[in-house]
Amino acid sequence: MKHIYLNLKRFDVPAELGGVNRQAPIQEYGHFVVSSTQEGLKKYDPAKVEFIQFLPEAHILNAVSARTSGSPLLLGSQGVYRENVAPGGNFGAFTTNRPAAAVKALGCEAVLIGHCEERNDKKGILAQAGVKDAYAINCLLNQEIRCAVEAGLKAVYCIGETAEEQPQWEQVLGAQLKEGLDGIEAAKEHVVIAYEPVWSIGPGKVPADQNYITKIARFVKEKTDGMDVVYGGGLKADNAGMLASIAEIDGGLIALTRFQGEIGFYPEEYLEIIRLYLGSGFEKA
């Protein structure tokens, strides 16, 4: 099974406000993304590949309403809170936070957890309290994964090392896997690992090459007893062929589709990236 994920981050912000959305009014953004992509994905065999799009929460209901009969798309939230609503317990006292029960009720089937941007946010908050140990971040993410899985959501758990951590990548990634996945052994089939080489992401940085990505994917599979691993450093048109050639990589995470000129996410370019990565071997017979 291949997994193609789309993380729309805050690509809904209009260009005139500093964002990259030139495609649709903000009120229609979720509907626009789904309606512009789902028909193009129907040619692929759902037994061989899954498509999940992670949207900012404000657009989830709009996106759910755009799904047509037979749509291959699953929708996801970009995070969940580390605690959840429970019958006979907390019934929803989570102001500003997203309990997994709310995400499920909105119509989501998946959640993105531990993206490098979420890790940076938690790192910054903990630093205010003088906490610099990455163990605390991994434990918080573990709580989020547990809540997600218990609520019946698929969890895409992101791991990755920064430039400062790269010399100790084995220890860093090993701890993120051990601590982040603690206690979910019985539900491992509901979790996919997304590897983000944080040190190589961003303008002017050298992208991770095939040998490095292969090395990491083999390491993750060894440490997790064969869990699926996708490339979270950005599945793009210019690396789709390379990533497709790595047997240990089970898919990828797409974000921006255009990196020059009017940068942003464009549905037709998203579908082209998928075509380049999957080829014809995953189409319906």
Image: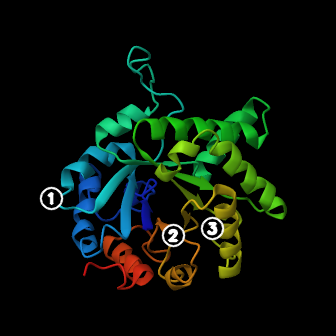
Give residue 146's position: percent from left, percent from top.
Answer: 53, 37
How far apart are labels 3 and 2 at the CA level?
23 Å
Give residue 107's position: percent from left, percent from top.
Answer: 29, 43
Label 1: few (<14), some or many (≥20) within 10 Å? few
Q: Residue at x 56, y 72 (%)?
A: 249
- Quadrant in the picture for the N terminus: bottom left
Q: Which residue is mark 1?
A: 69
Which one is earlier in the sequence, the residue at label 2 or at label 1? 1
Q: Which residue is mark 3?
A: 202
Give residue 284's position: percent from left, percent from top.
Answer: 26, 78
Q: Which residue is mark 2?
A: 250
Q: Residue at x 83, y 59 (%)?
A: 168
Q: Residue furthest left?
A: 69
* Residues at marks 1 and 3 touching, judged by CB atoms closer than 8 Å: no
Is 77 situated above or below 276? Answer: above
How far apart are labels 2 and 1 at the CA level?
27 Å
Residue 110 appears in view: yes
Task: Determine which of the numbered discs, if any, sits on residue 253 in the image.
Answer: none
Q: Residue at x 55, y 79 (%)?
A: 243
Disc number lying in front (2 or 1): 2
Residue 165 appears in view: no
Residue 180 or 102: which is nearer the viewer? 180
Is 122 situated above or below 43? Answer: above
Residue 283 or 265: which is nearer the viewer? 283
How far apart are labels 1 and 3 at the CA level?
38 Å
Question: Amino acid type of disc 1?
Answer: Ser
Question: Amino acid type of disc 3?
Answer: Gly
